[in-house]
Amino acid sequence: MKMENQSVETDFIVSGLFHDGQMDTFLFVAIVILFSVALMGNITLVLLIHLDTRLHAPMYFLLSQLSFIDMMYVSTMVPKMTTNFLTNSKIITFLGCEIQAFVFLTLGGTEALLGFMSCDRYVAICHPLHYPVLMNKKNCWFMVTCAWTSSSINALVHALYVFQLPFCRSRIVNHFFCEVPPLLPLVCLDTSQYEHAILLSELIILLLPFMAILASYAHVLTVVFQMSSGKGQTKAVSPCSSHLTVASLFYMTTLSTYTRLHSFHFPEQDKAMAVFYTIITPLLNPFIYSLRNKEVIGAMGKLLV
């Protein structure tokens, strides 16, 4: 009995998005629908790219990797969140919380593929003759490997450090999943130096890819607007503008969360931000990259016929 009590004391209570109000059922149904659509959209895109040989190009290879990451991303916290709602329980074990934080940080870092995708568009539009050499299969796999390796190492360092700290305050995580910033107020030590370390690492993991995206598309737009063909301009700008919109949504909300000291965090605001980069962005990605892409639409039509 004593060991059970000790085990319970090491668990965390995740406050969640639902607070026993009248809107809880509506919010729960909305989250489940968004999760289902995001999951099915990304699965469909991965299958289309895998099955249709016309989509075996570097851009679509990177897109399939992004969709795979997004599938895992939404699956990291939504199933646990909905299970807690249905069972009327908000408890997550210490190990479960640590694993969730690690997986989330890893997947968030691998969104650096958005930066590599912008580089793909930059090379395709600005240096088309070099495209087959620079964006060959070997280099694409190298990009994916770099994204996974760097994000995994970063996530492992943060997860191991945070979860060896003494949690001697409330065990209530004021969030809807285990994320590093909401855990820091529960630590009974001064975490200000560690928060500066978070700032530095996230500037590298998040800001550098975002700056690469902005720089790539700045060059792309410069080249595009020098084109004489209006049709060519539209064809080039359309996918770039969609990509830039999704990337900005993800990186701006994530940077806002991870570049502030915990004394400047407001739980409700953080939850709203997190909904954007954990659910909305994975939901939008497959539709933005497919609905405005004739090759993907053609592959989908071929598959349905």
Image: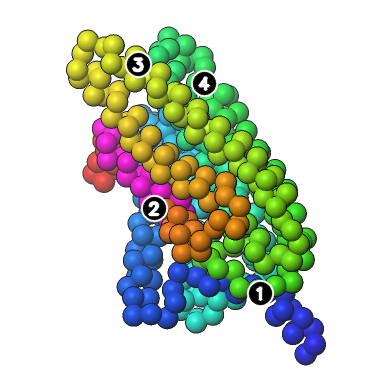
> Of the residues tagged 1 and 4, which is closer to the observer?
1
Q: Are marks 2 and 1 in contact (CB under 8 Å)?
A: no
Q: CA distance from mark 4 to mark 3?
A: 25 Å
52 up-or-down from 282: above or below:
above
Disc 1 residue type? Ser
In the rendering, at what x and y percent does residue 281 appear? 41, 48
In the rendering, at what x and y percent does residue 245 appear? 36, 38
Q: CA distance from mark 2 to mark 1?
A: 30 Å
Q: Secondary structure at mark 3?
A: helix
Q: Secondary structure at mark 2?
A: helix
Residue range in magenta is 277-295
143 up-or-down from 37: above or below:
above
Disc 4 residue type? Asn
Which image quadrant is residue 174 in?
bottom right
> Of the residues tagged 1 and 3, which is closer to the observer?
1
**Residue 83: within the magenta?**
no
Estimate how packed mark 4 is, as few (under 14), some (14 to 19) or many (20 or more) residues with alpha carbons within 10 Å.
few
In the rendering, at what x and y percent does residue 252 appear? 46, 43
Say which residue label 4 marks: 136
Say which residue label 1 marks: 170
Q: Are marks 1 and 3 in contact (CB under 8 Å)?
A: no
